[in-house]
Amino acid sequence: MSALLNRRQIRTFHNVADAYRAPGDPVADLLAPVERELRHEGPGAIRRVELLLTVLDWRSVFSRHLRPFWRLPREARAQVLGGRLLAGPLADLRARMDRAREAQRAPTPRDEKR
């Protein structure tokens, strides 16, 4: 369980990561590396991500989808993420997720010796 985010925010985070995942890419748990990065950056970064995930979850309820973000099908989630309203904060979150994905793909020194 996350120490930084509540259950609803975690659920939204995983659904954002799934919507940004390219078809055919393996599902990766990006929460731990992103949280580690947020802890390093401080409480301001943590709060921005918390607010972004909360707003994103409720935005779809008050839009034409009428459901929380995490209950939308993948195509509808991608459509919500493609909007201009949250483009800046979402770009920051996506960059964090991309860095975490790249870190998981990078070979470890143990793997290189084999």
Image: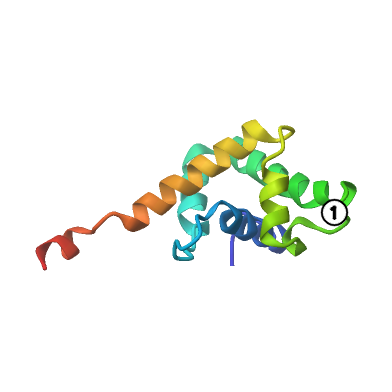
Task: Indicate left or right for 102 with 91 as reference.
Answer: left
Against 1, residue 99 (above or below) is: above
Which quarter of the image is occupied by the C terminus? Answer: bottom left
Q: Residue 73 falls in which quadrant of the image?
A: bottom right
Badge 1 marks a residue whose secondary structure is loop
Against 49, residue 5 (above or below) is: below
Q: Residue at x 88, y 49 (%)?
A: 64
Task: Indicate left or right for 20 with 111 as reference.
Answer: right
Q: Residue 92 falls in which quadrant of the image?
A: top right
What is the x, y in percent for residue 113? Answer: 10, 64
Query: Which residue is disc 1 drawn over?
Result: 65
Q: Residue at x 73, y 46 (%)?
A: 80
Q: Amino acid at mark 1?
A: His
Q: Residue at x 35, y 52 (%)?
A: 103
What is the x, y in percent for residue 93? Answer: 57, 42
Task: Indicate left or right for 17 with 103 as reference.
Answer: right
| Nearer to us in this view, 68 or 110 | 68
Coloring basis for residues: rainbow
